[in-house]
Image: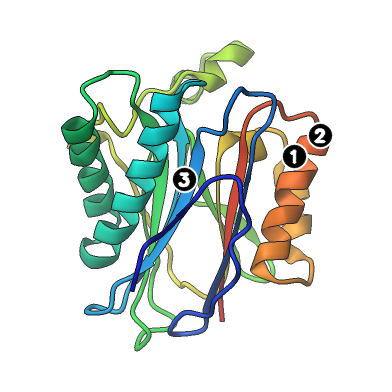
Amino acid sequence: MQTTASIAIVRPEQPRPGGIIPGGVSRRGRRSLNADAYATYTDPIVGRAAFVVADGIGDNLLAARAARTAASVAARMGARGGAVAGVFAAQQELLRQFPEQQADCVLVVAVLPAAGRPDGPCDIAWVGDTRAYRWNGRVLHQITTDHTVAEFMRAKGIAPSGRMDHLVTTSARTVRPAAIGRACTGSSRGRLLLSTDGVHKRLDMVEIKAVLAADGSAGSVAEALVDSALQAGSTDNTTALVVDCR
């Protein structure tokens, strides 16, 4: 099966093996271009499905190309080798294709189990401040923890200034193996959300939960999240990839 990578469009929803239905939306905020990207891939051999959201660091063409490249590679390699393998593969491809330091991004990779294990765990890896959430029908859980200066300071009991929430401590191009964020959910059932900071830094947990809990397809929910963030004043690029796991 082919990898699908996207910027600034709504992808038609296609059911995947195991009742997995994704829907993604990415829109440009007040930037000169959209440096966000997302990608999905189902490996025909192992049967796992991978979903990736990437956010280019900077408002330039190199950042946009880095995000799109990293998302596509991480989805393909993540489905076969796991979420961390997807991050590693994205890093190697960025270093191979782009000598420029500006070609960098942050990303989150989620890998769902093969169709024969519909309630198996979801494997997640990330760098930077892209996020993964899971709505299980009752509770919204933020799976990832931002790799930012602000989050580091909070962990030390120090109150950060607002701007420090936008300073990432890891990126796809520079991260070392031990610094990659890793998590695993107990179950894959429910609704998974991968997002860039243009969405989740404008919407709080209550607002995100209300949208994810609403009836509607994965694509319509992703669109509602992006629209809500823009209406709330987001000036950044906004991307949401929603995956329904039935």
Q: What residue sits right under mark 1 in the picture?
A: 229
Mark 2 burial class by Cα count in 10 Å: few <14, some 14-19, many 20+: few
Q: Amino acid at mark 2?
A: Ala
Evaluate if marks 2 and 1 touch, with contact meaning CB atoms under 8 Å apart.
Answer: yes
Using residue 207 as the reference point, say whether residue 106 is left or right of it.
Answer: left
Q: What residue sits right under mark 3 in the picture?
A: 144
Residue 80 position in % (x across, y down): 23, 66
Above or below, 173 relative to 209: above
Give the quarter of the figure containing the C terminus: bottom right
The residue lying furthest to the bottom in this view is 116
Q: Earlier in the sequence, mark 1 or mark 3?
A: 3
Q: Looking at the image, which is closer to me, 231 or 126?
A: 231
Which quadrant holds residue 95?
top left
Q: Earlier in the sequence, mark 3 or mark 2?
A: 3
Which quadrant holds residue 184?
bottom left
- C-alpha separation, residue under disc 3 versus residue under disc 2: 23 Å
Residue 106 position in % (x across, y down): 40, 34
Evaluate if marks 1 and 3 touch, with contact meaning CB atoms under 8 Å apart.
Answer: no
Say which residue appears at 44% left-offset and 26% top-offset: 61
Q: Secondary structure at mark 1?
A: helix
Using residue 60 as the reference point, say whether residue 9 is left or right of it.
Answer: right
Say which residue appears at 40% left-offset and 42% top-offset: 68
The residue lying furthest to the right in this view is 231
- C-alpha separation, residue under disc 1 versus residue under disc 3: 19 Å
Q: What residue sits right under mark 2 in the picture?
A: 232
